[in-house]
């Protein structure tokens, strides 16, 4: 009888044991999240920015950068503020001084004056954001809607996000960890409690979290904050060129093996790139030890390089691989020499759709010369593009200036027409155009082929 009772209880005992076995991994995971939050929590602060006039104040987050009172946050959290207040985790309150701000990356550093020894502050630990993988678990700590020191969790959805139009220089980690107003300036953390990103933005149609959040990569944050602490501003590297992305037509035309790399479309004769020398049509494929994915990646890597440093550059010239060392200059934007210079590695890629030319050109009007930085004898001004024509399909617009056809410089409208007769559009034309002001240049392929075909000239 006793044996029967034991046998009857056996299913319940097994179920309970299996439940415990399944619970243990979950408890271990919970303890991992708890430990990460405990590690980073002392480094997270609340930032209140009081703005002048009728703008009131805003609440964001910050991260203790150094034990001497340096604190990291977003530029947009403290912009146009007349007073910045910082509240630590132990509820001590301080008025902070702005050390430096970089709106191009949305990174800022402020400083509080300590009343007690510096050991009372716990700086955040940085991790290498390049080592982050899609699918990694992450947590965030911040002050969403003023709810101080809130912890949320999610995974890395993507990395290396750019061209979102949020900042001038973008290297975002995308995550589905909930981030809301007030989280800006707080950390995105790995499960060791190390910072892999600075929370900066969300994609939302409601103003609240909708599953897509963006954090500035910790490696970019570290470079920018180090420059601010050292120089009081950000000094950016400068090559003196503009570049665009490759598509299959351009890759075929310039003998590149694929569409990876940055296609040089203009070189400043006074810049470091001209001394290598780089030429329009070259494809930059590596900067220092890192491959170059596209023009935005090149801009980010060059801009993040300390001026004065020597860097090895690798590029393709008509399909032939070349390397050279280049002395990185300082961006004219930092030297207040923007006028007459080219922006550092501007990504000047218009949205183009190449397919299988109907356009009208005139000489550049004298009244436009000063505005666009060109004069008669330096191109053909597009005044008409027929709908559905090869030129229209390639993305050419009225107001563009055609500078070259098949890399032959165009001197005037009549010269362009002469070149089109000498080089009939049997397969493709390579057009160099300028859109708007000086420096905003791009290569465009006009083709008679159907979309997706890449037969060369």
Image (spheres, rainbow, N blue to C red):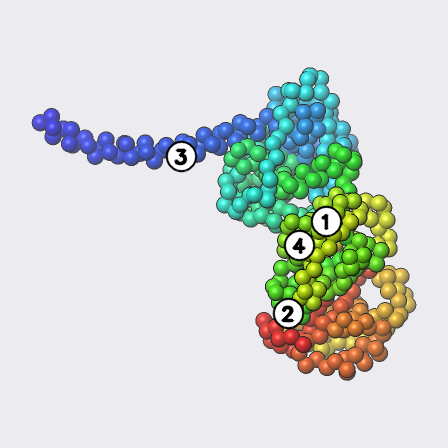
Q: Please provide percent x and percent y for residue 144.
A: 59, 35
Answer whether residue 204 is visible to the viewer in this image: no
Q: Name the secondary structure under disc 4.
A: strand
Return the disc, 1 or 3, that comes first in the chain's sequence. Answer: 3
Q: Name the secondary structure under disc 1.
A: strand
Discs 4, 1 touching: Cβ within 8 Å = no
Discs 4, 3 touching: Cβ within 8 Å = no
Instruction: Check disc 3: other Cα within 10 Å, few if <14, some if 14-19, many if 20+.
Output: few
Q: CA distance from mark 4 to mark 3?
A: 43 Å
Q: Please provide percent x and percent y for residue 64.
A: 65, 29
Give the residue at mark 2.
252
Return the disc, 4 or 1, that comes first in the chain's sequence. Answer: 4
The mark lying in front, picked from 1 and 3, is 1
Instruction: Check disc 4: other Cα within 10 Å, few if <14, some if 14-19, many if 20+.
Output: many
Q: Please provide percent x and percent y for residue 293.
A: 63, 55
Quadrant location of the C terminus in the rendered image:
bottom right
Give the residue at mark 1.
311
Q: CA distance from mark 2 to mark 4?
A: 19 Å
Instruction: Check disc 2: other Cα within 10 Å, few if <14, some if 14-19, many if 20+.
Output: some
Quadrant location of the N terminus in the rendered image:
top left
Q: Name the secondary structure under disc 2.
A: helix
Give the residue at mark 4.
286
Residue in the picture at 52% in, 47% down: 134
Discs 2, 4 touching: Cβ within 8 Å = no
Return the disc, 2 or 4, that comes first in the chain's sequence. Answer: 2
Discs 1, 2 touching: Cβ within 8 Å = no
Give the residue at mark 3.
26
């Amino acid at each position: 009888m006793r044996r029967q009772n034991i046998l009857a209880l056996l299913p319940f005992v097994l179920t309970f044991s299996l439940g415990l076995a399944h619970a243990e991994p979950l408890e271990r995971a919970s303890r991992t999240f708890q430990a990460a939050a405990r590690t980073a929590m002392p480094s997270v602060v609340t930032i209140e920015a009081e703005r002048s006039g009728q703008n009131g104040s805003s609440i964001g987050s910050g991260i203790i950068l150094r034990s001497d009172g340096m604190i990291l946050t977003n530029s947009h959290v403290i912009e146009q503020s007349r007073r910045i207040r910082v509240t630590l985790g132990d509820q001590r309150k301080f008025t902070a001084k702005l050390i430096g701000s970089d709106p191009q990356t949305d990174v800022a550093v402020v400083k509080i004056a300590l009343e007690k020894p510096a050991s009372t502050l716990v700086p955040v630990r940085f991790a290498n954001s390049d080592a982050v993988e899609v699918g990694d678990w992450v947590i965030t700590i911040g002050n969403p809607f003023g709810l101080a020191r809130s912890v949320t969790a999610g995974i890395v959805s993507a990395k290396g996000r750019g061209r979102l139009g949020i900042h001038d220089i973008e290297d975002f980690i995308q995550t589905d960890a909930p981030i809301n107003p007030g989280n800006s300036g707080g950390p995105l953390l790995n499960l060791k409690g190390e910072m892999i990103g600075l929370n900066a933005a969300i994609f939302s149609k409601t103003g609240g979290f909708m599953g897509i959040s963006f954090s500035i990569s910790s490696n970019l944050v570290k470079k920018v904050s180090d420059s601010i602490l050292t120089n009081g501003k950000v000094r950016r590297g400068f090559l003196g060129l503009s570049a665009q992305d490759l598509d299959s037509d351009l890759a075929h035309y310039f003998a590149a093996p694929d569409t990876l790399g940055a296609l040089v479309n203009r070189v400043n004769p006074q810049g470091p790139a001209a001394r290598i020398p780089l030429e329009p049509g070259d494809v930059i494929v590596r900067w220092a030890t890192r491959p170059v994915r596209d023009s935005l990646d090149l801009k980010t890597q060059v801009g993040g390089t300390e001026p004065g440093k020597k860097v090895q550059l690798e590029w393709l010239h008509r399909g032939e691989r070349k390397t050279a060392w280049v002395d990185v200059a300082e961006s004219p934007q930092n030297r207040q020499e923007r006028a007459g210079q080219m922006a550092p590695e501007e990504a000047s890629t218009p949205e183009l759709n190449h397919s299988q030319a109907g356009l009208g050109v005139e000489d550049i009007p004298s009244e436009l010369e000063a505005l666009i930085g060109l004069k008669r004898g330096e191109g053909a001004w597009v005044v008409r593009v027929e709908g559905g024509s090869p030129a229209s399909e390639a993305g050419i617009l009225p107001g563009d200036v055609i500078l070259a056809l098949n890399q032959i410089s165009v001197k005037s409208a009549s010269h362009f027409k002469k070149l089109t007769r000498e080089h009939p559009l049997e397969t493709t034309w390579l057009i160099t155009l300028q859109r708007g002001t000086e420096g905003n240049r791009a290569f465009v392929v006009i083709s008679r082929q159907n979309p997706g075909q890449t037969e060369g000239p």
